[in-house]
Amino acid sequence: EDQVTQSPEALRLQEGESSSLNCSYTVSGLRGLFWYRQDPGKGPEFLFTLYSAGEEKEKERLKATLTKKESFLHITAPKPEDSATYLCAIPAGGYQKVTFGTGTKLQVIP
Amino acid sequence: EAQVTQNPRYLITVTGKKLTVTCSQNMNHEYMSWYRQDPGLGLRQIYYSMNVEVTDKGDVPEGYKVSRKEKRNFPLILESPSPNQTSLYFCASSLGGANGYTFGSGTRLTVV
């Protein structure tokens, strides 16, 4: 059964303090891995798709990387507006049947 | 503006009273999906649709129905809601492949 596990559940950072979020997965044949950001009371917002081990994607202060067993979301010099829950997800059986992790709630303190 | 629109945003209903949550997208996306989000359990897929008249079960389809009669609309139907269906529901759409989903703003459903 396909599984996605995210850690830590919650992370509190000072503004400017860089860190990484982890997403480990088990799937029979990876077709890609998605990262989303979710603000309180809103729907998730798509950030990245990573297709293969070694791939990296960047957006502002975020950089996502992928290995054969896990993905990392690196946050460089975060700002308070980066506070959100970050979700990773994998397609299973086809791109439209998607399994999500439970997320990492990030709080960046000024 | 490209968006997924869900209605209503909030709904309180009683056990057994049939309800429909509507979802519409204006991006001409082929793929649409419904999720529920519960504390500690994360987002779980209820149903998804690959095209008009083509739907399939996600991980938690019991107690729900969907239909896709038009490309833009994908309503979620609860024929006989129960308290364990109290949750935050999201509709989403996608171009397909690995483009990722665009999510609606959510519907908070309470069944008493």
Image (cartoon, grey):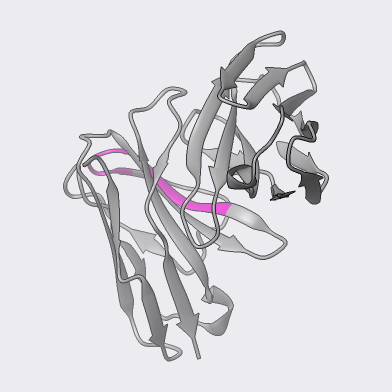
Name the residue located 32 percent from the left edge and 77 percent from the top edge: B19
Task: Give the image quarter of residue B83.
Answer: bottom right
The stretch of residues the image draws in magenta is: B44-54
Residue B52 magenta-highlighted? yes
Name the residue located 20 percent from the left edge and 34 percent from the top edge: B28
Query: Would you say the magenta stretch is mainly helix, strand or loop?
Result: strand
Name the residue located 51 percent from the left edge and 82 percent from the top edge: B82
Q: In this view, does B12 lie above or below A39?
A: below
Apparent side of residue A65 relative to residue B87 in the rendered image (left or right) = right
Apparent side of residue B6 relative to residue A103 in the rendered image (left or right) = left
Can residue A17 be spotted in the picture? yes
Q: Quadrant of the N terminus of chain B?
A: top left
**Is residue B74 or residue A81 the one in the foreground?**
A81
Apparent side of residue A65 relative to residue B45 in the rendered image (left or right) = right
Name the residue located 56 percent from the left edge and 25 percent from the top edge: A60
Q: Is residue A60 above or below residue A79?
A: above
Residue A68 magenta-highlighted? no
Spot occupied by residue B23 in the image (x, y as percentages of width and height): 28, 57
Spot occupied by residue B77 in the image (x, y as percentages of width and height): 34, 68
Task: Give the image quarter of residue B31.
Answer: top left
Q: Which residue lies furthest to the left in this view?
A: B70
